[in-house]
Amino acid sequence: MIFTTSKKLLIFTSLFLIFQNVSLAQKFDPTGRDDFKPDHIISSEITTKEYLIHMSFPKNYSIQDSITYPVLYVLDGKTTYGYFESPSYIDFEKIEDVIIVGISHKAMGVQSKINRFIDYTPYRDTITEKRFEKKFGVQNGTIKTGGAQKFLKCLKQEIIPFIDKHYKTNSVRGISGHSLGGLFVAYCFVNSDNYFTKFGINSPSFQLNEEIFLEPAVSKFSDNQNWNIDPTKVFISTGENESPMMVSNMIKFSMFLKKRNYGNVDMDWHIYRNKTHTSVIPFCLNGTLTTLFGKK
């Protein structure tokens, strides 16, 4: 059968609208959510753990339009999601529209801490394992480290594809973490493959065993005059009243990166006055958002 040009155009337009409506119908509508419950629980075949997902959406987010949004993935979302939509802590007037996805372990108590150690640490560290087994009062061999590569694979192949499938995201991704989470984000940054191009490295636990991660990272900044990655933004912070080693190591990491002056890395760092390891959390989250997703 031979179609005229106008008929072809009509058929093409109809098919396009059909597929577009199907695509939109697959997106979850965030209206009517319970802000105090996780939006999703994702079971990982890669890490064999369950993860809680807490989300925050731009004010005008709607499944009825075709607007897409960048995403900031925040580790330990179970303890930080209360700040996601709080004008008391987040300066929304300075931040572009962004979807915030909090990721945390479903496990509670000591088991949650054990899970954080395995998922967020880049390399096996038996010194740290023994020290924290004693601190937590658990048996030898309970705490394992060095699972960051597997957790990153879980993010890339399980959690983020789920978010991209069901929500109106675009290709701009950021990741932020605090403490052990900050160490994991630093690992993602130092080994960047452009999957994330925005990094919030807050109160990073470089002090666990400096020779394993911090020193090689500093050496990389010192030795590599060029770094062939996409344009990248980085925010690094700590609280003034955190442990002296944590503060000094954060400064060391930041200064060596700043000194290298990579043309494709836009970096800012901040020490929050009178803030402790816990009280700094909402402030570094706001700093991460305003630095990485600030309005132009």
Image: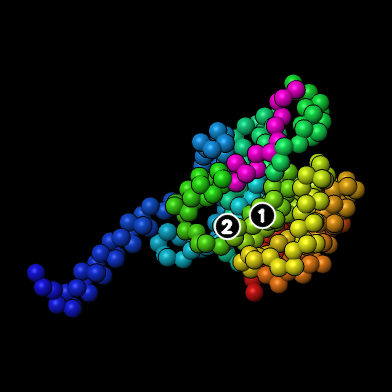
Alpha-carbon neighbours of circle 1 within 10 Å: few (<14), some, or many (≥20)?
Answer: few
Residue identified by numbered label 2: 195
Give yes or no for residue 147 being in the magenta stretch: yes
Amino acid type indicated by mark 2: Tyr
Residue visible at 69% across and 47% down? 184
Up the image or down, 229 lies above or below 110; here it is: below
Amino acid type indicated by mark 1: Asn
Looking at the picture, how far across and down is residue 165, in whole percent? 44, 52
Residue nearest the viewer, comparing 4 with 18: 4
Residue visible at 85% across and 57% down? 251
Local SS, label 2: loop
Looking at the picture, how far across and down is residue 281, in whole percent? 75, 50
Residue identified by numbered label 1: 191
Question: Is 131 on the left-hand or right-hand side of 193?
Answer: right
Q: Which residues are magenta?
A: 140-152
Question: Is 261 on the left-hand or right-hand side of 47?
Answer: right
Give yes or no for residue 283 being in the magenta stretch: no
Q: CA distance from mark 2 to mark 1?
A: 10 Å
Up the image or down, 8 lies above or below 57; here it is: below
Alpha-carbon neighbours of circle 2 within 10 Å: few (<14), some, or many (≥20)?
Answer: some
Residue nearest the viewer, comparing 260 with 137: 260
Query: Dividing the picture into quarters, in which one does residue 151 lie?
Result: top right
Give the quadrant of the N terminus: bottom left
- Name of the residue lying farthest toward the bottom: 5
Q: Nearer the viewer, mark 2 or mark 1?
A: 1
Give the quadrant of the C terminus: bottom right
